[in-house]
Image: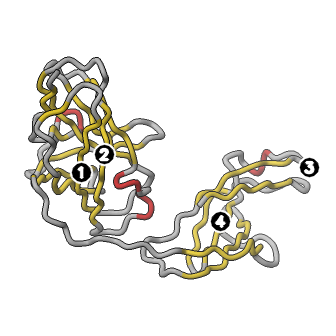
Amino acid sequence: MTLDLYWQAAGDLPDGLQLAVRLGDVAQAVPLSRYDTGQWRDGEIVHEKVTLAAPPEMPPGKYKLALRPLTADGRPLGEAEVVLGNVEIIGMDRLFDLPPVEIPLAADFGGLAQLRGMDRLADTAAPGDTVPLTLYWQVDGRAPELVSVFVHVLNGQGEQVAQSDQWPGGLPSDIWAEGQIIVDEHAISLPADLPPGEYRLAVGLYTPHNGQRLPATDAAGAPLPDNRLILPITLVVQP
């Protein structure tokens, strides 16, 4: 959930003001602005966005959302917090038992998630086809920032000729719960002019804001080249 906040400076402000954001009994402190409050001019209006993630274990229900400015050392600023209203948390079904997978896999990505398996591809595909691929991830820890999964189709020279990028299972990683199984369905569009031949698929996780891939290791803990797992299947493209 993202809040658009508009602040107006009333006189000189101290440096490093923070903002306490409370959803029910869950509170977090964030910088009040990316632009140090000590540099604000009297009367200046500053627009900030604040992203708030409800903990995955938070029960469904309505929760009060409130804000309160804090000093740089965390002391409340002002008489009372400002209540913005109620936020309704909607429950979601989560899967914690790995369903039967056709091809078991074992690779770890940054201590955040393991790739536990995949379903088989169709025997062949044609240029211009959409190839379905299902991956199975298991969450190991909390993500410090949002991550996406990439699936790259590689030709015999290792060149990328097609890809699929998305949040794993369509779920932002800040709502994952530890131990949760993410069923991640991809639809990979092949170019209409893709030459016939055999192709490999590479999978990994990365942070979209900077393109940085999460460190990838195999079942023995050895680093995987290019922080990606080459899937143990071959995609055969026929004319």
Where's residue 149, x and y in %? 33, 45
- Earlier along the polypeptide chain: callout 2 or callout 3? 3
Q: Earlier in the sequence, mark 4 or mark 2?
A: 4
Q: Distance between the residues labelled 3 and 4?
A: 25 Å
Of the residues shown, which amino acid type is indicated by label 3?
Answer: Gly
Instruction: Assess disc 2: are there few (<14), some (14-19) or many (≥20) residues with their C-alpha within 10 Å of its C-alpha.
Output: many
Q: Do the residues labelled 4 and 2 touch (CB within 8 Å)?
A: no
Q: Mark 3 points at which residue?
A: 43
Observer-nearest residue: 225 or 32?
Answer: 225
Q: Circle 1 sits on which residue?
A: 134
161 left or right of 50 in image = left
To which residue does mark 2 refer? 186
How busy is the neighbourhood of tag 3: few (under 14 within 10 Å), some, or many (20 plus)? few
Secondary element type, mark 1: strand
The residue labelled by disc 4 is 73
The secondary element bearing badge 2 is classed as strand
Q: Which residue is drawn at 71% across and 45% down?
A: 35
Up/down of 126 relative to 222, above or below: above
Q: Is residue 201 left or right of residue 146?
A: left
Q: What is the CA distance from the residue labelled 2 to the residue labelled 1? A: 6 Å
- Residue 179 image point, x, y percent: 27, 69
Q: Which amino acid does label 1 sit on?
A: Thr
Q: Nearer the viewer, residue 128 or 116?
A: 128
Q: Is mark 4 on a helix, strand or loop?
A: loop
